[in-house]
Amino acid sequence: MASRTRKSSKRKSTLLRIAVALFLCFVCYTIVKLQIGISQMKSRLSDIEKENAAIEMEIEEKKITLEEGATRENVERIARETLNYVYPDEIIYTDLP
């Protein structure tokens, strides 16, 4: 009878060790997965901060342009660059590839 209890206690001990080992593997896997997620989020945050800085610079440029007012030179530059306007007697030549 004593040998049966030893075998069952050894079996329980082995099962407990296997369960603990599996739990530790699961915890390690979860930690690694979370670390990878954190690094991806940090990278994404960095990209968004760079984009935000670029947009803020553009806003500052627009504020300066707004403060200068709509001078004739500014209106002409915007019409030429953005809308491709030309003077009535002006001919624009472009090279085609």
Image (tube, rainbow, N blue to C red):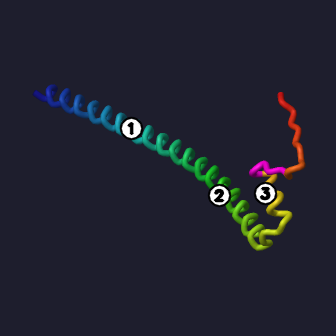
**Marks 1 and 3, Cα distance to the nearest angstrom?**
61 Å
Front residue (pair 72, 22): 72
- The circle drawn on residue 34 is none
Residue 50 in picture, x, y percent from top left = 67, 54
Sequence-earlier tag: 1 or 2: 1
Residue in the picture at 20% in, 33% down: 9
Q: How many marks?
A: 3
Asked if labels 2 and 3 touch by Cβ distance under 8 angstroms, the answer is: no
Residue in the picture at 47% in, 45% down: 34
- Looking at the rendered structure, the secondary structure element under dot 3 is helix
Q: Tell which tag, 1 or 3, sits nearer the viewer.
A: 3
> Label 1 sits on what residue type?
Phe
Q: Tell which tag, 1 or 2, sits nearer the viewer.
A: 2
User: Callout 2: 10 Å neighbours few (<14), some, many (20+)?
Assistant: few
Instruction: Judge left or right: residue 36 versus residue 87.
Output: left
**Marks 3 and 2, Cα distance to the nearest angstrom?**
25 Å
Question: Which residue is disc 2 drawn over?
Answer: 52
Q: Is residue 29 above or below residue 50?
A: above
**Marks 1 and 2, Cα distance to the nearest angstrom?**
38 Å
- The circle drawn on residue 78 is 3
In the image, residue 5 lies in the stretch drawn in magenta: no
Question: Which residue is disc 1 drawn over?
Answer: 26
User: Callout 3: 10 Å neighbours few (<14), some, many (20+)?
Assistant: few
In the image, residue 83 lies in the stretch drawn in magenta: yes
> Label 2 sits on what residue type?
Asn
Asked if labels 2 and 1 touch by Cβ distance under 8 angstroms, the answer is: no
Tell me the magenta residue range. 82-86
